[in-house]
Image (cartoon, grey):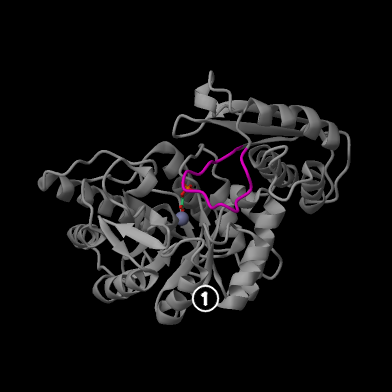
């Protein structure tokens, strides 16, 4: 289906962390319009596509995005308005070429991804289809993904002493999306009560999870298992499992990992994870080692790859070239998928395809700075990948995605759960 944009307009809005980001609206010649909100990360990989920020200290401490807004309303509008595109890939190619840099730094990855996401949505709207249908490659069965609820926040997402960034609960054993969301919310409520009964704070981190003053990861895992039990679920793969994203690049310096005051080598970390996996129902480990520690990642994959889904986030950056290298080197067995990390919808779909064809899992993800946009819910369904993370079952920008998934489920009968062999 072709599309001819007649207008593209960006506005500076706020993300969930009170930092500026962009909302982009595209209008087609037939009057169809669609909008996208641009997410933004805090624990970013060094090889991510680069957000353009104004750097003007008199506005938002330099974090304004008026330059990126100007790029959309100026150069990009000029390049795409009045031109007919055969598909998303052609439009994205024009954006990439117009930018001309390796990492989208000139126009700004935030400008480019906003236009690319809005284009994907306007294509679906013009076709009268839900977005997930137009993000569904031929031959791939769409499915409802297992939601991974980030219920305890640490690292750079919270002001506590906890070095590991994310502790997630994943209702792998739920029969439906609706029951999975219910399990997440009930565990979250039980966890709040448990923390409060121990006199721990129940204030929230950036992704809506609690941010208690606990420094040892194992202590959090103990409380989580109790919360799952107290909510009436079985802790494990046939019930509610646990997923971890230590985001370890953030506490890796000079070849050493610093966890709760201890200095650990890559092999110490691998031993620690091996013990954790023995003791707790942890089914997934994301960024267990740092983005620069490829040798450590190889050993981690040899040791735990058969037992645990090992997801690369900072190390892979949703980048098809880096993912291909990781597949060859047997570094990890799954990739996190963040649209703004690579900067266009087309490259995101390419990253997903490469993973699928290599037998790697794909884990669709929000960012710690979000808008109410539900794009990733549809991306997860259309890709058929079977897993998504969008933070806690709390806060509007997080639950918007889970609510969208329940609405998709209520409209169409789709299978729920982890995809086996694509
Ligand atoms: P970010 O973190 O959005 O702050 O980069 C998310 C993650 O590490 O998965
Ligand atoms: Zn991560």
- Which residue is outermost to the top? 58
**Is 365 drawn above or below residue 326 in the view shown?**
above
* Residue located at (65% from left, 62% from top): 351
* Residue located at (44% from left, 63% from top): 286
* Residue located at (40% from left, 78% from top): 304
* Residue located at (84% from left, 31% from top): 78
**For numbered disc 1, what is the local secondary structure?**
loop
- Which residue is outermost to the right? 83
Q: Position of residue 145 (x, y in %)?
A: 49, 61
Residue 238 shown in magenta: no
Quadrant placement of the C terminus:
bottom right
Residue 30 visible somewhere in the drawing: no
Q: Position of residue 353 (x, y in %)?
A: 66, 67
Quarter of the image holding residue 81?
top right
**Is 78 drawn above or below residue 196 in the view shown?**
above
Q: Position of residue 75 (x, y in %)?
A: 80, 31
Between 295 and 201, the one lying in front of the other is 295
Classify residue 119 as left or right of residue 200.
right
- Read off the residue under disc 1: 420
Q: Main secondary structure of the magenta part?
A: loop
Quarter of the image holding residue 9?
top right
Q: Which residues are magenta?
A: 37-51
Please tell me how many numbered marks the rendered image carries: 1
């Amino acid at each position: 289906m072709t599309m001819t944009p007649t207008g593209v307009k960006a506005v500076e809005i706020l993300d969930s962390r009170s930092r500026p980001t962009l909302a982009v609206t595209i209008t087609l010649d037939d009057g169809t319009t669609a909008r996208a909100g641009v997410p933004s990360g805090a624990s970013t990989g060094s090889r991510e596509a680069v957000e353009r920020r104004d750097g003007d200290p008199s506005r938002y401490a330099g974090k304004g995005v008026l330059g990126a807004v100007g790029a959309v309303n100026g150069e990009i509008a000029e390049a795409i308005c009045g031109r007919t595109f055969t598909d998303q890939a052609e439009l994205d190619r024009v954006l990439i070429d117009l930018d001309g840099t390796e990492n989208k730094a000139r126009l700004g990855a935030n400008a480019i991804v906003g236009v690319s996401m809005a284009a994907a949505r306007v294509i679906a709207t013009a076709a009268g289809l839900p977005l997930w249908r137009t993000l569904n490659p031929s031959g791939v069965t769409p499915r409802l993904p297992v939601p991974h609820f980030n219920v305890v926040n640490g690292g750079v997402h919270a002001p506590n002493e906890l070095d590991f960034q994310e502790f997630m609960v994943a209702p792998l054993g739920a029969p439906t999306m609706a029951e999975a969301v219910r399990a997440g919310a009930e565990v979250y409520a039980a966890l709040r009560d448990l923390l409060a009964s121990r006199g721990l704070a129940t204030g929230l981190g950036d992704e809506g999870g609690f941010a208690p003053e606990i420094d040892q990861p194992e202590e959090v895992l103990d409380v989580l298992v109790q919360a799952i039990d107290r909510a009436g679920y079985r802790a494990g793969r046939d019930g509610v499992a646990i997923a971890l994203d230590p985001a370890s690049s953030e506490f890796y310096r000079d070849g050493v990992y610093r966890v709760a005051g201890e200095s650990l080598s890559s092999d110490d970390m691998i031993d620690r994870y091996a013990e954790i996996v023995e003791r707790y129902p942890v089914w997934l480990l994301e960024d267990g080692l740092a983005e620069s520690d490829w040798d450590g990642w190889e050993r981690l994959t040899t040791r735990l790859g058969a037992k645990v889904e090992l997801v690369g986030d900072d190390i892979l950056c949703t980048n098809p070239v880096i993912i291909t290298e990781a597949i060859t080197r047997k570094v990890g067995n799954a990739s996190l998928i963040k649209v703004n990390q690579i900067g266009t919808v087309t490259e995101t779909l390419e990253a997903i395809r490469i993973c699928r064809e290599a037998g790697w899992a794909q884990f669709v993800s929000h960012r710690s700075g979000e808008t109410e946009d539900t794009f990733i819910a549809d991306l997860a369904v259309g890709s058929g990948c079977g897993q998504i993370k969008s933070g806690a079952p709390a806060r509007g920008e997080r639950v918007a995605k889970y609510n969208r998934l329940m609405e998709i489920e209520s409209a169409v009968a789709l299978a729920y759960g982890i995809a086996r062999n694509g």
